[in-house]
């Protein structure tokens, strides 16, 4: 059996193509859109024109048999800029939800609408988190009630931290259909463009990733036809029946089931892609710091000649490479259908997120006073990196997932 970490010619070609786009289109615009705190529609449209912002492109990377297509793409785009990168890839959150839970007809109907066309670009939003339900998904209050006579669903509630929330054409909303079942009693719904009752709430002014639109989504008596329930009513009824049987067995003293296992497996599979984004940010900051240390002269010599600076750069590069290897391992395991027996998905996201935050901080330190100004990009990179220990599961939640997986215990 041959072991190699060498990329194929096709992977190298895609990587170099995306790197060129990130260097020539994304980076020159990064500071402007960070200051404006607006969705960079012209950049998204250019990405669509080149074929980067499209269902076909993401599908090709997703089905890369090595599993490395998506992490390679994410690292390069976020090397360019995290805010613009998230504006470009944010739609995939909603698309993946439909691909994972929807019927073939639903996939064919809704996913193309999420991206639109290069001439008429659209974005989509995935709405799960709520003001009182972030890491604790069982606390979700958004309700979906079925009107059997009309085969319609009535949705009410408020979602928060929704990327593209309110400006999207298609919204995918997670709602509770059976509160007694907690996280197992939830389902996902597609809210088509222009549906009455859906509106944008507060738009958040953020510390970082400012070019990515983040807002509340308010659902006020949103009526949806039955076919907007992802997977369909029959599949939902079967799943709820199984969940009620498990709940009854537990109440009767049966074997204890840890909640949310299926959902946890889904999150585990998606976390390496987020880790790859963090690796891209860290690599970008490291490269700026390395170049600065080589050219900045103090006391008659470049500051990289000082052991304190050189060792910091050595540690930065080592952590970046280690983070990338964790991301690639988890991505390969997911593509090869290998179980995450040690929560490898969470490991990759945890280490990459912590690495991005630490490396960007070190880059600011190496640049000294210049690193604290907006004249240099590491200040923005440091702000962008901060969210990678928070979203897609905080670092504390990642450690909890890893600890539970390793111990087999429901550690709190």
Image (cartoon, rainbow, N blue to C red):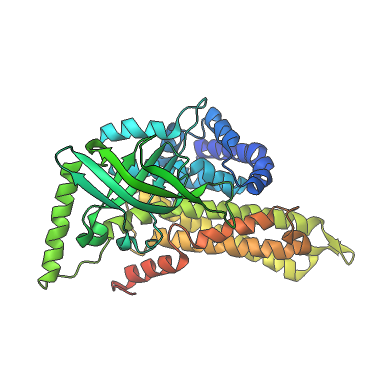
Res 15 quadrant in image: top right
Q: Would residue 35 be visible to someone looking at this image?
A: yes
Decide: is 73 above or below 375.
Answer: above
Q: Residue 283: where, in percent of width, then height?
A: 61, 54
Q: Quadrant of the C terminus?
A: bottom left
Residue 235 found in image quarter: top left
User: Where is residue 17 shown, x and y percent of the image?
Assistant: 58, 35
Q: Nearer the viewer, residue 59 or 194?
A: 194
Residue at 58% x, 49% y: name it: 82
Q: Compared to 155, does 355 lie above or below?
A: below
Which residue is at 31% across, 50% downward?
Answer: 156
Residue 22 x/y as whole percent: 62, 41
- On screen, residue 239 versus residue 394, left or right, reads left
Residue in view at x 71 percent, y 58 percent: 289
- Is residue 99 visible to the viewer in this orientation of the structure? no
Q: Position of residue 52 (x, y in %)?
A: 52, 34
């Amino acid at each position: 059996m041959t072991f190699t970490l060498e990329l194929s010619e096709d992977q190298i070609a895609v990587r170099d193509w995306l790197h060129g786009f990130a260097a020539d289109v994304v980076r020159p615009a990064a500071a402007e859109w960070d200051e404006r705190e607006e969705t960079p529609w012209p950049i998204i449209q250019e990405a669509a024109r080149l074929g980067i912002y499209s269902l076909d492109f993401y599908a090709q990377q997703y089905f890369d048999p090595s599993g490395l297509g998506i992490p390679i793409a994410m690292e390069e785009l976020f090397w360019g800029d995290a805010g613009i990168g998230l504006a470009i890839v944010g739609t995939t959150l909603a698309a993946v939800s439909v691909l994972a839970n929807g019927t073939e007809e639903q996939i064919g109907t809704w996913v193309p609408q999420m991206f639109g066309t290069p001439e008429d670009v659209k974005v989509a939003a995935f709405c799960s988190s709520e003001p009182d339900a972030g890491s604790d998904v069982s606390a979700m209050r958004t309700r979906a009630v079925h009107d059997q006579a009309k085969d319609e669903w009535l949705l009410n509630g408020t979602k928060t931290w929704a990327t593209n929330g309110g400006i999207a054409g298609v919204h995918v909303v997670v709602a509770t259909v059976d509160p007694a079942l907690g996280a197992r009693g939830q389902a996902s719904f597609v809210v088509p463009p222009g549906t009455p009752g859906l509106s944008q709430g507060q738009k958040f002014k953020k510390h970082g990733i400012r070019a990515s639109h983040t807002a509340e989504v308010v659902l006020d008596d949103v009526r949806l036809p039955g076919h907007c329930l992802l997977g369909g009513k029959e599949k939902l009824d079967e799943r709820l029946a199984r969940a009620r049987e498990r709940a009854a067995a537990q109440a009767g003293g049966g074997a204890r089931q840890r909640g949310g296992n299926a959902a946890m497996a889904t999150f585990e599979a998606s976390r390496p892609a987020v880790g790859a984004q963090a690796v891209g940010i860290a690599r970008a900051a490291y490269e700026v710091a390395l170049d600065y240390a080589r050219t900045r002269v103090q006391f008659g010599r470049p500051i990289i000649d000082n052991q304190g600076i050189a060792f910091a750069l050595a540690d930065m590069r080592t952590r970046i490479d280690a983070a990338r290897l964790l991301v690639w391992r988890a991505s390969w395991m997911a593509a090869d259908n290998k179980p995450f027996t040690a929560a490898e998905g969470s490991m990759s996201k945890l280490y990459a997120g912590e690495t991005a935050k630490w490396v960007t901080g070190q880059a600011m330190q190496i640049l000294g006073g210049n690193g604290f100004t907006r004249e240099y990009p590491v200040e923005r990179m440091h702000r962008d990196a901060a969210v990678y220990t928070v979203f897609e599961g905080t670092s504390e939640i990642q450690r909890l997932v890893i600890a539970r997986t390793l111990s087999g215990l429901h550690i709190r």
